Every structure is written in C-alpha cells, then in structure tokens.
Image: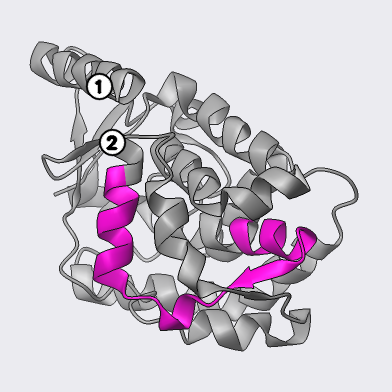
Amino acid sequence: MFDPFGDYETAGYLRNVEKLKNSEIIKIQEHVFFEANLEDAIAYLKTINGPIAYDHFLKVHQILFGEFYPWSGQDRHMLGVGRLISKGQHIQFEAAESCRRAVEWGLEMGNDVKTMQAKPGTVMGMFAWGHPFLDGNGRTMLLVHTELCSRADFSIDWQSSVKGSYLQSLTQEIQSPGKGILDAYLKPFVRPHQSIQHWAESIKAIPGLDGNSNAMPNIVYLNSDAEANKRYEEFKRMRQEN
C-alpha cells in the first residue's frame, strides 16, 4: 500500500476527506472530483497572463482534487513526505527536493512557442519525471500541457492515442530524456488548435483517464533506505548518460 504519511489505518489512503481505503472506490471518487472541477481548472488556466509558472501548476492540482485530498496543491517537498518514489521497479521519479525544478524546466520549454511545437513530448516527460504530487500528477500535467499546446496554436488528439503505447513511450522518455521518444509518439496525434469550448468533453473522453487500469502502483521509500537511495542515484545517472 502506498502510504507516505504512515497513517493509512486511521486516515485512509493519502488522508482523503472520507478516509476511504478501498482502491476501487478511491479511483471512482478521484475521478468524480476531477470531472466536477475540470471546467474550473480550465477556466483558471485561461486567466493566466504571461508564462505558466510552478505556482499555477500547483493551483491546477488544488482546484481538481482539493475537495478530496486536503493536501492538494502542495508538492512532496512541501509536505515533507515521499522523498523517493518509484513506479513499480521500472521508474524512479525525481527526489522531492528537486521535483519543482524538474517541472519548472518543463514549463520553461513549454512556455516557448517554438520549443513547445517541436518538443511536446519532451515537455510532458519533464513533468512526469518531476512527479510533484502524491496523486493526480497525470491529470494535472495533462491540463497544463493542453494549455501550453493551445498557446502554441495546436492540440493533441489524446482520444486517438493508445494508453498502453503512450505510457510505454512516456516510460522510455523518463529513462532516456532528450532523444525525442515521446515527441515521436505524439507527432501523429498533433492537430490544429482546438477551441476551449471543446476541451472539457474531449478530456473526459480520453480512454483510461479515470485510472481504471492495471498500472503499477507507486512505491515510497524511507529516506534512510540505502538501497533506494542507490537506485535513485543510478537512475538519475542513467538519465544523464543516455
């Protein structure tokens, strides 16, 4: 069980407001709140004048999930938990103290129109590597990414993508950044700019967005776990060398 706070038995999964423990019910509730708050999050992104910043990224997460997770809008470093997190045994995410910088790097690229047009997968890969939140990362970065695409005058046809293939490419992008792996995957799904009026329904229709899949669970490690720290350093070195 993913329990970075260490109080699953008394507070439920990630201290959700209903203290739920059943994973299937939690997935349903998460998605209920996501869909209920989706239009507000989209509207918020449209009010931002100038470049999208990390604080905006946090705010989108808070709008989407704040009614279910009281800690929403705070990253792992702010919360002081989940310094080292992996997805199964295949992916190590950035350490909590550096997750902000990873996302900011993605935002720096995404706020530049020419870079966003050329490297939308690279931008998404940096968001995924940062993995700032204990839950809700994918849906949050999807909305921010959609706004960045809009500002760069194009859209991604996520409904036509295949979730399994996308996640495989995203995994490879995290493991080997800078090679254009996810850029190449997304290229066939690039479409003309989509009107904001269609965003909510298009996003809701994306297959697998409700979390009902066989995706590997997150695993959290203690700061004192020497083996986990070693794996993290090795994974980060591999990213730099690839």
- Judging depth in this view, the residue of 209 and 176 nearest the camera is 176
According to the picture, the residue beneath numbered tag 1 turns out to be 238
Circles 1 and 2: CB distance less than 8 Å?
yes
Is 177 included in the stretch rendered in magenta?
Answer: no
From the viewer's perspective, is residue 9 above or below residue 154?
Answer: above
Overall secondary structure of the magenta section: helix
Outermost right residue? 49
- Judging depth in this view, the residue of 32 and 237 nearest the camera is 237
Q: Residue at x 56, y 25 (%)?
A: 101
x%, y% of residue 116?
66, 49
Question: In this view of the protein, can residue 59 be seen by the observer?
Answer: no
- Judging depth in this view, the residue of 18 and 188 nearest the camera is 188
According to the picture, the residue beneath numbered tag 2 turns out to be 175
- Judging depth in this view, the residue of 188 and 13 nearest the camera is 188
x%, y% of residue 216?
16, 56
Q: Residue at x 62, y 45 (%)?
A: 58
Q: Which residues are magenta?
A: 145-172
Question: Quadrant of the rendered structure where residue 209 is?
Answer: bottom left
Horizontal side of residue 217 vs 115, given as left or right? left
Horizontal side of residue 185 vs 56, given as left or right? left
